[in-house]
Amino acid sequence: SIWERGAQVLGMDRARLQTLVENCLREYPTWEEAPMMAERLRVPLHPDYTFYWKCVSGAEALLLRGWLGKGTLKIDDAVIRKIVLPYYSHTPLYLQGKQVLDKLGVPHKIINKELLILDKKEADLLAYCFRFSSQQEMESIALNGADALNGADGNAHASEENTTGLDFLRSICPVQLRDKAGTFVGARMGRPEKAKMRLLTGSPQVMFPVGEEGERLRSFQAALEAGMVNS
């Protein structure tokens, strides 16, 4: 059957594959499953493991990569546990890096106003997208990003400004990435319970409301005399 063929291609249990497909809105693949499915089936990475890359510019993605090069990759038993980044609130460069994480929707924690922690899920995803699996690889891959972070390579920085972060990641990520953001539509709504009573000049009728036809006082009689009432 198609389930057996798919399970054979992916090297996973048939029942698990069927569950992921039939209950895709409730059952998400694990991190071990998501990249494998994207690579072997040639489909985009699962949206649960995709950040809002289109909401940042290519230069901001490059800045983030440079900031990662200044951090520490925590690995235990050959498994990435977290990424620890330097963060000082009085340093503009680190503030810019945090703003990029905010735009991307990356959960993170700030410890003692000097360290920023990315937990396992976020660390795994960033390591996969930026293609590093060790401290040495993270530092070497981030060299160009570090130059942009320090403003050393103005030309590279300017060229990435014309692209989105999604375009930048697509050029280096081993699997397809789709736009998760789409188009945002924002609106503002006041608080009705806090609104003050608004009084109109004159005494408008409730049964027969009169607007400007009733002149300044919104008078029904004035509207009648002006010939505005037809019946």
Image: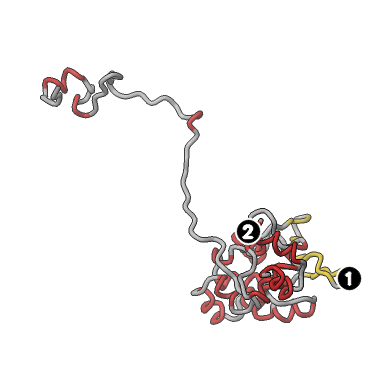
Q: Is residue 44 visible?
A: yes
Q: Nearer the viewer, residue 150 or 24?
A: 24
Residue 160 in percent (x, y) is at 54, 76
Q: Residue at the spot x=57%, y=70% of the render? A: 165
Residue 142 in percent (x, y) is at 69, 77
Colour option used: secondary structure
Q: Identify the residue under disc 2.
A: 105
Residue type pointed to by label 2: Gly
Question: Element type at marker 1?
Answer: loop
Looking at the rendering, which quadrant does residue 168 occupy?
A: bottom right
Q: Quadrant of the N terminus?
A: bottom right
Question: Element type at marker 2?
Answer: loop
Residue type pointed to by label 1: Asp
Q: Nearer the viewer, residue 196 or 204?
A: 204
Q: Identify the residue under disc 1.
A: 77
Residue 58 in percent (x, y) is at 56, 73
Q: Residue furthest right?
A: 77
Q: Residue at the spot x=47%, y=37% of the render? A: 190
Q: Is residue 68 visible?
A: no
